[in-house]
Amino acid sequence: MRALALLPAIVSGSVGFDVRADANGHTATRAAFAEHLARLRSRVRDDFTIVIQPPFVVIGDETPATVNQRATNTVKWAVDKLKQDYFESDPTEIIDIWLFKDGTSYTNHARLLFNETPATPFGFYSAEHHALIMNISTGGGTLVHEIVHPFMRANFPACPAWFNEGLGSLYEQSTEKNGHIRGLINWRYKGLERAIRERKTISFRQLTSMTDTEFYGGADNRGYSQYYAQARYLCYYLQEKGLLVKFYHEFAANAKKDPAGYDSLRRVLGEDNMSAFQKKWEKFILDLRAP
């Protein structure tokens, strides 16, 4: 097994895992990472590289330099930027991020290591194994999306699917602007544009009131892509108006009284008439240029 930044990453003074939670919000101890690493060694082939990037452990079958670069430039970058604006606490558990170099490696290792057949060519989260399992050849966008979810569970466990997936999917294609993470227009735009032109969007009251099962489309996945797109581009609108971070914190603080987030959304937007706002939002979306 090749190793980059293993024990040095654990004992580094800038990380400091000697206490339960350090100044950076890391909750796993040095001993916990060492124990976790020992278990991984029994499962990982010699041609894999492991990089500890708190609160994750990154494991990949690309070159050591490439795995290390992804751990720093994608995982650490995303974690730092998400915590800067949204999340105070790390996930309590150590989560593995498995980065497989291509579709064949991804499919084969998902079956071999996790007894799972991927339902998506991009990647997925296995709650049973506390692992993100990714086909990294498709790009890092899905990885950043999936990183949002364990942080949301740790900081806002009552978050409904519409906002959890809306925020995650916002950062499927993202960049840094003025020192902060920023979502960009992505492939979900075209489907939403079509739904708006065909008058098939749903009201924001309906979107925010959906159960997780309803949002994810039920047994037939009906509406699945559209709901994701509408939630993503509501988050995009809030971002472009400078309101997204404010909305997250207000929603999280008031979730007991407003579990759907609809009232918080109205307050942050300053909108009394949400039907009129939806028309304004749809015009804003149509005025965007698809990638």
Image (cartoon, rainbow, N blue to C red):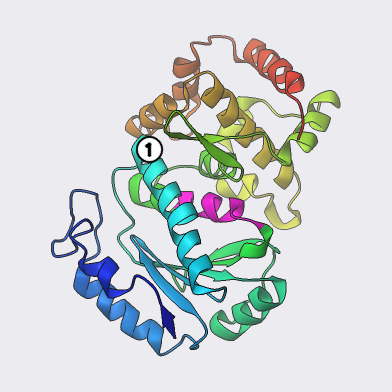
Can residue 132 be seen?
no
Magenta residues span 139-149
Image height check: is 219 above or below 175? below
Between residues 20 and 14, which one lies in front from this camera angle? 14
Residue drawn where x is 61% and y is 80% of the image: 109
Q: Which residue is identified by label 1?
A: 86
Q: Amino acid at mark 1?
A: Tyr
Q: In which quadrant is the N terminus drawn? A: bottom left
Main SS class of the magenta portion in the image? helix
Q: In the image, is residue 140 part of the stretch drawn in magenta?
A: yes
Q: Quadrant of residue 150?
A: bottom left
Residue 23 at x, y percent in the picture: 18, 48
Crowdedness near tag 1: few (<14), some (14–19) or many (≥20) residues, C-alpha within 10 Å: some
Q: In which quadrant is the C terminus drawn? A: top right
Residue drawn where x is 79% and y is 37% of the image: 191
Between residues 138 and 124, which one lies in front from this camera angle? 138
Residue 103 at x, y percent in the picture: 71, 71
Q: Secondary structure at mark 1?
A: loop
Residue 53 at x, y percent in the picture: 36, 62
Can residue 253 be seen?
yes
For residue 251, side relative to residue 160 (left or right): left
Q: Quadrant of residue 19?
A: bottom left
Residue 54 at x, y percent in the picture: 33, 60
Q: How many marks?
A: 1
Q: In the image, is residue 166 part of the stretch drawn in magenta?
A: no
Residue drawn where x is 16% and y is 60% of the image: 20
Residue farthest to the left, as pictured: 19
